[in-house]
């Protein structure tokens, strides 16, 4: 099921400029907080609910009940789009989809489990599905 926020303060928001800068709390994001292994972004971009759902399904299929998966991201930014064949003007379009704006250094997924080889294999499969470059980070 695609994820969307239940309630939000404003229906539409400004477009965020996704610079390839390190997120503000880079020191906190550098280490794994809840799990053993994490997937960290190396560049900025947008992740849609379809990406998150695909990654969740892939991890559940590969890891089964051997480990616990925690996604640190949620799509809460609305992206608007005007209908096709509509003239310019007449205000901003309706909300088309929801995305999560990822900055470099953000943690995407944290996994807690015993079998590191299986977890690494699952995270490598996810890396191919995501539209941004990522890196696997281990607990120190």
Image: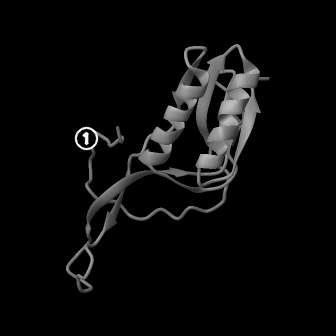
Q: Residue furthest front?
A: 61
Name above or below for residue 17 compared with residue 59: below
| Quadrant of the drawing holding the N terminus | top left
Q: Decide if residue 109 is in sight here.
A: yes
Instruction: Locate residue 94 relative to residue 43 in the image: left or right.
Output: left
- As drawn, is 78 to the left or to the right of 54? left
139 lies above or below 127: above
Q: Position of residue 104 (x, y in %)?
A: 65, 50
Q: In what element is the residue under mark 1?
A: loop
Q: Position of residue 98 (x, y in %)?
A: 37, 52
The quarter of the picture where residue 97 lies is bottom left
Measured from the top left, where is residue 93 in percent x and y? 26, 69
Residue 104 horizontal side relative to residue 95, left or right: right
Seen as rendered, the residue at the extreme left is: 90
Q: Residue at x 23, y 82 (%)?
A: 86
The residue where tag 1 is placed is: 7
Residue 9 shown left or right of residue 48 in the figure? left
Q: Residue furthest bottom?
A: 87
Tell me if I can see residue 25 in this picture.
Answer: no
Q: Residue at x 59, y 54 (%)?
A: 131
Q: Residue at x 59, y 47 (%)?
A: 129
Could you say which quadrant of the image residue 37 lies in? top right
Q: Quadrant of the C terminus?
A: top right
Query: Counting other residues with Cα less than 10 Å from the Cα at mark 1, is it few (<14), some (14-19), or many (20 or more)?
Result: few
Counting every numbered tag in the picture gives 1
Based on the displayed image, in which of its 4 quarters is residue 90 positioned? Answer: bottom left
Residue at 70% in and 38% down: 124
């Amino acid at each position: 099921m695609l994820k969307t926020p239940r309630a939000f303060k404003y229906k539409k928001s400004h477009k965020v400029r996704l610079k390839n800068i390190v997120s503000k709390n880079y020191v906190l994001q550098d280490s794994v907080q809840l799990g053993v292994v994490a997937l960290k972004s190396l560049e900025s971009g947008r992740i849609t609910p379809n990406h998150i759902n695909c990654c969740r399904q892939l991890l559940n299929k590969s890891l089964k009940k051997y480990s616990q998966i925690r996604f640190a991201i949620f799509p809460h930014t609305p992206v608007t789009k005007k209908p096709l064949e509509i003239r310019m003007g007449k205000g901003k379009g309706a909300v088309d989809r929801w995305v999560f704006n990822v900055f470099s250094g953000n943690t995407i997924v944290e996994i807690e489990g015993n079998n590191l080889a299986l977890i690494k294999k699952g995270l490598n499969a996810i890396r191919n599905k995501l539209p941004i470059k990522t890196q696997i980070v281990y607990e120190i």
